[in-house]
Amino acid sequence: MATTGGPPATGIVTPEAVLLEFETAGVASRTIAELLDIGVQFGSLFVLTMIVAFVAAAMGAELGGAVAAIALLIGFFLALVGYPAVMETFWNGRTLGKATMGLRVVTREGAPERFRHAAIRSMIGLIEIYALVGIPAVISILTSRREQRLGDHVAGTIVLRQRAGRRAAPPVAFGVPWNWESYVQSLDVSPITDEQYGVVRAVLLRCGELAPDARWQVTTEVATMVAGRMRIPVPTQVPPEMFLTSVATAYQRRSGR
């Protein structure tokens, strides 16, 4: 099964088994979202500065000056780096600006953005957005096939403009195949990444649309990939689709999905 190339034109299936209609976000919408976020960030810094100045004045010139410098340094870091990293991690790839513009950050595979992705984007954003006034970011977005800024290239993410025309499908939970409870419990799925789990779920959701021969070929190839990741032999005694269902069930149990 081919797994290379860009996402399909109509959407991608995320690891939560959600069909997401999208188009990549361009310079205009991303710039507006960034300006909204900058307004939030510097508004917060203004309030922090007022509070720090009041506290420093009450503490005296020498001690208050040192405390103010440390507090403002930490505040700037949290506002410029911590705000986008934390917001995107815990708000499904969005910040206040992105949510206003209908944007969302996901990985290239369509998986949810994790903290490591958001942190990389934020740290590089210090240079390409703040230090260099966004010029490298704009150039990168305009010249990238998926409209990625430098931080997206390094973090492995893309920014999507979500369409409101189609509601996302609800998450799907896979049950234990009949009489396969002990086999599911025996599977160690810890080596499986979110992206690989997303492939498994997408295949299980869509394999019913395939012809029998194609269905067997696709599930066999994905089962081989998954078994290799788990460092176990391809289970010849288990049909590939049943093996993938067992892996998905074990993964959901392990991750609490």
Image (cartoon, helix red, strand yellow):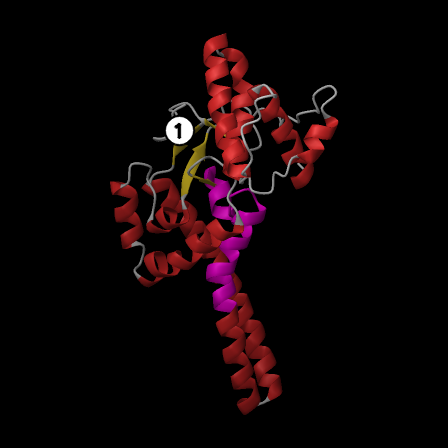
Relative vertical location of residue 72 with respect to residue 109 in this rendering, above or below: below
Q: Which structural element holds mark 1?
A: loop
| Displayed quadrant of residue 252 | top right
Where is residue 169? Give x, y as percent. 58, 24
Residue at 45% across / 13% down in the picture? 214
Please state if 159 lies on the left or on the right of 202 as rendered.
Answer: left
Q: Is residue 98 rendered magenta in the image?
A: yes
Where is residue 177? Give x, y as percent. 70, 21
Q: Which residues are magenta?
A: 75-104
Relative vertical location of residue 175 with respect to residue 153 in this rendering, above or below: above
Where is residue 192? Give x, y as percent. 55, 39
Q: Tell me the residue that label 1 is attached to.
A: 3
Q: Residues within 10 Å of mark 1 (few under 14, many from 20)?
A: few
Residue at 25% across / 41% down in the picture? 143
Q: What is the count of numbered marks?
A: 1
Which sits in the foreground, 115 or 69? 115
Please state if 16 lies on the left or on the right of 81 as rendered.
Answer: right
Relative vertical location of residue 211 with respect to residue 31 in this rendering, above or below: above
Q: Is residue 236 rendered magenta in the image?
A: no
Residue at 52% across / 85% down in the picture? 65
Main SS of the magenta part reads helix
Which sits in the foreground, 106 or 204? 204
Where is residue 209? Give x, y as percent. 51, 12
Residue at 47% across / 47% down in the picture? 97
Please state if 197 lies on the left or on the right of 254 as rendered.
Answer: left
Give the quarter of the figure containing the C terminus: top right
Which sits in the foreground, 56 or 217? 217
Q: Is residue 245 visible?
A: yes
Give, as a three-letter code, the residue at label 1: Thr
Give the quarter of the figure containing the N terminus: top left
